[in-house]
Amino acid sequence: MRIKENYLLKQREIKEDPEGRTAEEVKRKAMDAVYKGVYSPEWDAFMRLFATNTSQLARLTGTDSTHDEEEYTAARAKLVANAVVGLEKTADSSFIEVLETDLDDSNSMPL
């Protein structure tokens, strides 16, 4: 699955969870990622919610060649910010297309 598909799937899971446990888990992981910072285990744990393989995780955590590119950094920040306010409340997921730009995960290992 692509990053965007993972994101949309998580949105659907949140919307279909009447008790709100999924939304709370995502929000808690996003806030932990913010508090502990990029490259922390908490950042990794949050980004794993949207990755299905090692290439996607490297892109989402910024440990690939895009780590210091502003456009990618902004997209990662938006992903975290959307999770804090509630993925189910955010309709725009176009920023994820940035994260998928030139992402070759054909030889990647599954998580």
Image (cartoon, rainbow, N blue to C red):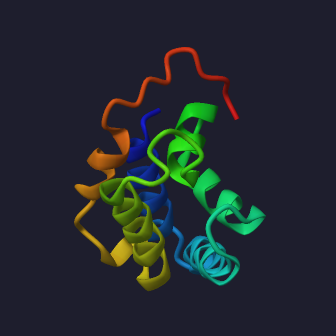
Q: Is residue 79 above or below residue 34?
A: above
Q: Quadrant of residue 78?
A: bottom left
Residue at 59% x, 37% y: name it: 52
Q: Quadrant of residue 49?
A: bottom right
Q: Taking 103 as reference, is 42 left or right?
A: right
Q: Taking 9 as reference, is 61 left or right?
A: right
Q: Position of residue 18 (x, y in %)?
A: 52, 77
* Residue 53 visible in image: no
Q: Position of residue 19 (x, y in %)?
A: 59, 80
Q: Position of residue 92 (x, y in %)?
A: 23, 65
Q: List the single residue furthest toward the top.
A: 107
Q: List the single residue furthest toward the right.
A: 41
Q: In this figure, what is the number of numbered marks?
A: 0
Q: Is residue 107 above or below residue 8?
A: above
Q: Which of the image's four quarters has the C terminus?
A: top right
Q: Taking 107 as reference, is 80 left or right?
A: left
* Residue 52 visible in image: yes
Q: Is residue 99 above or below residue 90?
A: above
Residue at 70% x, 78% y: name it: 36
- Camera-side residue of 17 and 90: 90
- Camera-side residue of 95 and 28: 95
Q: Position of residue 45 (x, y in %)?
A: 70, 60
Residue at 47% x, 46% y: name it: 6
Q: Taking 52 as reference, is 7 left or right?
A: left
Residue at 54% x, 40% y: name it: 64
